[in-house]
Image (spheres, grey):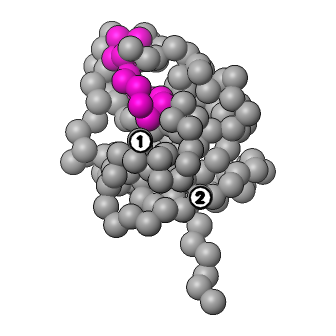
Amino acid sequence: MAKEVKTNAMRFLEKNRIPYEERTYECDEFIDGITVADALGQPLDETFKTLVAHGKSGSYYCFLIPVDKELDLKKAAKSVGEKSVELLHVKDLTAVTGYVRGGCTPIGMKKQFMTVVNDTAEALESFYISGGKIGVQIKVSPRSLVEAIRGRFEDILM
């Protein structure tokens, strides 16, 4: 019998006693969040992608938004107290976060960055985020997650 492989994200949730549900899909390389949501039968407005950005100050930030929406960089910058933010280049993602594109999640990174979750998630009982590696999604309470990572909810969509 194969040993169940836990990701850093799962270990973080278990350590903080946050219930979650793991969902897996077959995939060897990056596919976009809409395709993942469709494959797993997850509503697009309940499936969130993690975007990593850096500000003029040099600090890094995580922004979680529905997979079918776009991040408003001005609102995102304002939400973290920066004049402006730029999305991190894909080539830098693993070095900064420890995660690969398609497996990036706001929990269990090399360092916990300030995280802002779009405010539409606040009203949801649960939502889906990456589980920390390609092929894994986690269903978790947005409020429990935000509390555990000391994040916040704000409108950051275009």
Residue 73 forms part of the magenta stretch:
yes
Q: Position of residue 15 (x, y in %)?
A: 72, 55
Given the image, on which type of amino acid does mark 1 rest? Ile
Question: Measured along the vertical axis of the image, is residue 3 above or below residue 52?
Answer: below
Q: Taking 105 as reference, is 122 above or below it?
A: above
Q: Which mark is residue 114?
A: none
The label number, if any, that marks residue 23 in the structure image: 2
**Left of 91 or right of it: where is 138?**
right
Q: Which residue is mark 1?
A: 34
Q: Residues within 10 Å of mark 1 (few under 14, many from 20)?
A: some
Amino acid type, mark 2: Arg
| Residue 86 higher or lower than 37, as above or below | above
Q: Nearer the viewer, residue 70 or 59?
A: 70
Q: Which one is nearer the viewer's eye here, 98 or 141?
A: 141
Residue name at image x 69 percent, y 38 percent:
126
Q: Secondary structure at mark 2?
A: strand
Work out whether mark 1 precedes mark 2 in sequence or the reverse, and give the earlier one: 2
- Let me know if residue 51 appears in the view: yes
Residue 97 image point, x, y percent: 39, 47
Q: CA distance from mark 1 to mark 2?
A: 15 Å
| Highlighted range, magenta | 59-76
Give the quadrant of residue 148. Answer: top right
Question: Image check: 21 left or right of 51?
Answer: right
- Residue in the picture at 38% in, 14% down: 158
Q: Quadrant of the N terminus?
A: bottom right
Task: Name the spot of residue 152 as percent of width and height, x first.
Answer: 60, 23
Q: Nearer the viewer, mark 1 or mark 2?
A: 1
